[in-house]
Amino acid sequence: MPFSRPPFTPLCQLSAGATGRICQINGDENFSQRLREMGFSEARLVTKISGTTTSLCQINGTRIALNHGAAMNILVELIPAVSR
């Protein structure tokens, strides 16, 4: 049975407090480059703090607000929460 990878989730669809690993950035080259300059690059972990129309995220210890369109173009793999 072949291994099937779960589909990626747009960052804007994560629940508040959830963490994801960035897997893909969609959009034109200028948009993608600007996100990478802000720290949103593939394989980085990002935590959604809050928001629906604007997503407040934390990446590399910095909080950044993204509009819904930008957050839709950042596809993440959900990282399961660690139980303590």
Image (cartoon, rainbow, N blue to C red):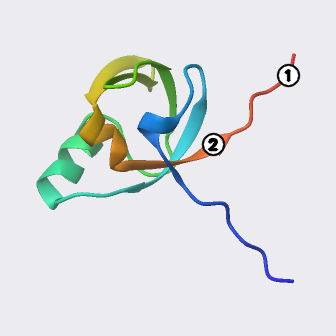
Residue lying at the far left of the rendered structure: 30
Pick whichever, 13 or 3, lies toward us. 13
Q: Quadrant of residue 39?
A: top left
Q: Amino acid at mark 1?
A: Ser
Q: Is residue 34 left or right of residue 15?
A: left
In the figure, 7 relative to 14: above or below? below
In the figure, 17 relative to 44: above or below? above
Pick whichever, 7 or 39, lies toward us. 7
Q: Which mark is residue 19?
A: none
Q: Position of residue 65 (x, y in %)?
A: 29, 21
Mark 2 or mark 1, which has the lower sequence index?
2
Q: Position of residue 43 (x, y in %)?
A: 51, 49
Q: Which mark is residue 83?
A: 1
Q: Residues within 10 Å of mark 2 (few under 14, many from 20)?
A: many
Pick whichever, 23 or 50, lies toward us. 50
Which residue appears at 63% of the width and 42% of the height?
78
* Circle 2 residue: 78
Q: Quadrant of the N terminus?
A: bottom right
Q: Quadrant of residue 36?
A: top left
Q: Amino acid at mark 2?
A: Leu
Which residue appears at 45% of the width and 39% of the height?
11
